[in-house]
Image (cartoon, helix red, strand yellow):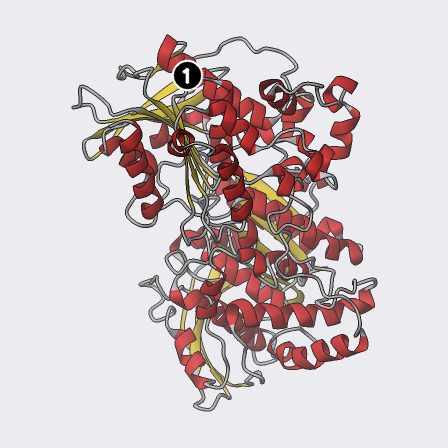
Amino acid sequence: MYMHVNAIKVCVFVLLFVVVAEAGADAPSVSSFEEPDALTFCNGHKVRSVEDWPSRVSEIHTLFCDTYLGRFPEHVPAVIAASELDRQQSNTETVKRIKVTFDTPHQASFELTLRIPAGPGPFPLLLLAPRYYQIPWADEAVRRGYVVCYFPGVDANQKEEAFPNYENVWKIFKNEYPEATWSSSLAIQAWLASRCLDYLLSPDCVVKIYPNQIGIMGHSRYGKMAIYAAAFDSRFSCVVARSSGVPTAASYRFSGRQTWSESVSPEDVPECWVLPSLKEYYGKENELPIEANALLATIAPRHLMLDTAFNDDGDQTFAVERCYLNAKKAYALHGAESKITLAWRRGGHNPILPERVQFNLDFFDCAFLRKTIDKSFYQENLLHAFDWDHWRTLQTSDDLEVPATDDTIKKLQWLLGHPTYQEAPCWHLTHPDDLFIPQEDRNIGRVDNCKRVPFAFSSGRQGNIYFDPDRTEYLATVLWLGPWSYATGSNEGYGIQGTTVPWRLAGEGYLVVTWDQVGFGEEILKNRTFYEQNPHWSKLGQAVADVQAALDFLLEGKGQAAASIPQADPTKICAAGFCYGGMVAVFAAALDDRITSVASFSGVTQFRDQTQANRTGGLALLSHCHAVVPKLGLFIGREKETPLDYDDIIRVIMPRPCLIYAPIRDRFANVDAVRHCVQSVQKTETAAKQVQIQTPDDICRFQKEQQDAFLLWLKTVYP
């Protein structure tokens, strides 16, 4: 018996049974920084055996439907008729259009298209939504001897001329079941893929299918659809989801405006993809009761590939890796760890290249025992995993012992650590073809009246400078430092409200300098090796060193630009950043007085307030999770003993102007602690003017409103 819509009917009963049977256990907090564990019931009890797993799967299905998709119909309609509409034949395949009618209240029907290879069968089966960029997968599958079924899964916001009305079939079936709460067009289309299986596995089907060799795959929104189908229907024995994003391959907790990725904001998600109620979690994604990791886990022990790119802004690597590792626990429970694969690729969201088509189809062939490939072909290569305990064994006594001094600078330097060796300057611009990011981002470019010029500095670091070439004077130079945007780094395209940070600042008359910080964007692969090469340093230390190197380039010419650039005024240099970038900006300003002002947006929250119970993730967020300051991990459980805090750092920055922007509803900060921090340094009227704090009733983001606030403040600092 397979898990599809009927499973939803029993979800409530199973959930109630589990809750009653295990009453008395303490339920985990849904506001946890971490994703809710796939192997932990809502009442806090753990899944301890394969026998426990079906109950947890039912619970996951119920929670996921109630949170994201809506409830499916209680009953699966039977196939009551199937007729061939058209047939085309060649030497290599036969294409048949089939109309399938179901026992719904109004006997609804839809059309599917079968591509059947030459031969008697039975055949393995691959289901695809017939979007044009997915057709190469179908072509290769047919060549390998698969039947390909194009099901009515073209997204509601897209069309395919060769498959008319495929994008609207979901609406017909949605209207057939007004009592169901299903609202997600993608989930309904995944349900339609299962209805295709009802026909394809029936004795009346025009082709014979191996029932244990059924695959489904998709790219982007169609990857979401593929995961939904496999998660709710165990007849799918293998699924490949390429760049499927949230809420399937990546969690909302580690995606969103603080990463410049997808979020639960209505501006990011088409209305018909998720329940309208999902928007209530905008800015408080940590309160979601279920996340992608649990849905992926329900596919265990069947084959699953998450195919994602290093620089895919819709599929943040950090979020995907965490979901994969947690879902893998369910595979380990079944002794099937080799059946789940996280496959990295170079580049961004698009395109689907021919070699990747082969790679994806090889995974199906391996799953169906049609082909043998060296296991190293799918070897696990983690991008963000950090072994803090191992790191600690590599430290010297001087590394682990806080300096006996009241000097904040020395404590700062201790916290950041030191590089193992000093790299020689390397100021050559890399050829665009060698980078992961789109080639145009490395070229001289223009938007409106502004210009972008690539430059190289430090030890091979590269960035862009933005300015209005028609100006003879610039209001100031802004060093712009991005957030936790692992995939896209500095990402000039951020902004869904008609704004982008560097271009807008340049248009307002500023000289803007930005680059991908270590571990982000084109520097993302350094996450794998940074601490192997620099066990006594930190990524935050490298980030601060890069700010200093960028200043060396601007003020001393230590670097190379692709074209002539304006001269920076050394008396007007602002370090500004959002989230992680805001943290880097504050640390850099404390350690380099060439920075004449600093603005930190959602980048400050007191270390001593960062306990494990804190919704922000505590010190572990920075020491273990993102691993940007490992030494902070030494103070977990004794946070009050952290040797310095932001009030100490801000005192070093004074009397230079400093803006701390701390939204009240920022889930990554405790705004009361931030207020107290700033108030502790605002002892005089002069100090209150030097260090300003803004605490709007808002969430963590940097869009038009936040940019407006930044520009207003800049004009007071550099009138």
Residue 496 image position (x, y, % from top left):
34, 49
The residue lying toward the viewer, choosing from 350 and 536, is: 536
Q: Amino acid at mark 1?
A: Arg
Q: Is residue 486 visible?
A: no
Instruction: Name the outermost residue toward the bottom.
Output: 105
The residue closer to the viewer here, 537 or 526, is: 537
Q: Position of residue 139 (x, y in %)?
A: 47, 53
Residue 294 against residue 533 in the figure, above or below: below
Name the residue at the front extreme.
684
**Residue 351: % across, % down:** 42, 43
* Quadrant location, the C terminus: top left
Q: Residue at x 52, y 74 (%)?
A: 70
What residue is disc 1 on?
Answer: 594
The one nearer the camera, 571 or 225, is 571
342 displayed left or right of 576: right
Image position of 256 with respect to 531: above or below = below
- Residue plotted at (41% across, 68% down): 272
Q: Quadrant of the N terminus?
A: bottom right
